[in-house]
């Protein structure tokens, strides 16, 4: 027979310890409990309210940012690293062809892409996540929205983007790029351009995908053939620009306008719906 009182005491003690160790421990415990299984009905209802509020806040904050390209990549590369330099060039080139640069808002590749956008007076947006490490918002953001729940943040990164660029990264980057590829594969989103940069870094993964997954027919060759691989920031931006204009008809013109009666200020992106 299981001693449930003892397990509850241990769980409570662990939560209290985490909360004392980290100022935002209570919030992280809420996210952890959400993934641990059924909770009380009242607790689940309150959590649903918090999740709904996060979605609403994200929709309102990002509605006017303009056509975005989301850049994925590691938070761990420093300013002098070649992949940081590459990401900064990507941010510049995407801004030069008219896109808002959206990232996870943290350091490393994310910071570099946002910084590149600001180098050329482009628009730079961060969709941040509360983490115990690595994820303070970088200083090159025109707008930043911070979320508690990973899945809400991931929806925002996909919802407002017309293309995706993946630079070298770890588990988080692979999660983001494979989820995007899965959404395209299953037609949950349109066939937006996907660009992978850092040939040498990603080559072993592509060898596995083509040599094992395609060979064993767990995916179709076309699922990987549409991914554009390059180490040139200019090529990446031009590919995204051309495909977006041809496939989705992006052109000069104003997007949605703020409505005063909805409490919306003048938050419209200076590049709203405009592709040069």
Image (cartoon, helix red, strand yellow):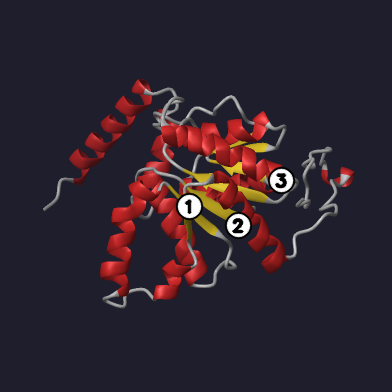
Residue 113 spot, x, y in % from top left: 56, 37
Disc 3 element: helix
**Residue 76 lies in what quarter of the image?**
top left
Q: How would you rate the neighbour count of disc 1 (Cα within 10 Å): few for under 14, some for 14-19, many for 20 or more?
A: some
* Residue 105 can be seen in this image: no
Answer left or right for 234 relative to 207.
right
User: In x, y percent, where is residue 69?
Assistant: 61, 49
- Is label 1 in a helix, a strand or a loop? strand
Residue 239: mark in rendering: 2
- Badge 2 local density, few (<14 within 10 Å), some, or many (20+)? some
Quarter of the image where one finds residue 101: top right
Q: Residue furthest right?
A: 260
Q: Earlier in the sequence, mark 1 or mark 2?
A: 1
Mark 1 sits on what residue? Answer: 230
| SS for callout 2 | helix
Q: Could you tell me which residue is drawn at 81 percent across and 41 percent down?
A: 264
Residue that carries the numbered disc 3 in the rendered image: 60
Answer with left or right where residue 17 lies relative to residue 257: left
């Amino acid at each position: 027979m299981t001693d449930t009182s003892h397990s509850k005491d241990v769980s409570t003690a662990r939560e209290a310890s985490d909360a004392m160790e980290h100022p935002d421990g209570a919030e992280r415990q809420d996210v952890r409990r959400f993934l641990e299984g059924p909770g009380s009905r009242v607790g689940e209802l309150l959590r649903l309210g918090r999740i709904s509020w996060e979605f609403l806040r994200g929709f309102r904050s990002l509605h006017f940012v303009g056509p975005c390209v989301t850049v994925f990549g590691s938070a761990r590369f420093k300013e002098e690293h070649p992949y940081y330099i590459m990401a900064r060039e990507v941010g510049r080139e995407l801004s030069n062809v008219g896109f808002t640069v959206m990232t996870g808002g943290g350091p490393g590749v994310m910071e570099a892409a946002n910084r590149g956008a600001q180098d050329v007076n482009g628009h730079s947006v961060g969709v941040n996540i509360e983490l115990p490490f690595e994820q303070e918002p970088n200083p090159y953001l025109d707008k930043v929205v911070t979320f508690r729940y990973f899945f809400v943040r991931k929806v925002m990164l996909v919802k407002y983007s017309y293309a995706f660029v993946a630079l070298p990264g770890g588990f988080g980057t692979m999660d983001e790029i494979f989820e995007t590829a899965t959404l395209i594969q299953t037609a949950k989103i349109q066939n937006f351009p996907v660009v992978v940069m850092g040939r040498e870094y990603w080559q072993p993964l592509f060898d596995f995908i083509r040599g094992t997954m395609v060979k064993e027919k767990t995916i179709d060759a076309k699922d990987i053939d549409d991914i554009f691989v390059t180490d040139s920031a200019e090529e990446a931006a031009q590919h995204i620009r051309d495909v977006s204009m041809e496939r989705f008809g992006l052109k000069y013109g104003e997007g949605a306008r703020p409505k005063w009666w909805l409490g919306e200020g003048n938050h419209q992106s200076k590049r709203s719906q405009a592709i040069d």
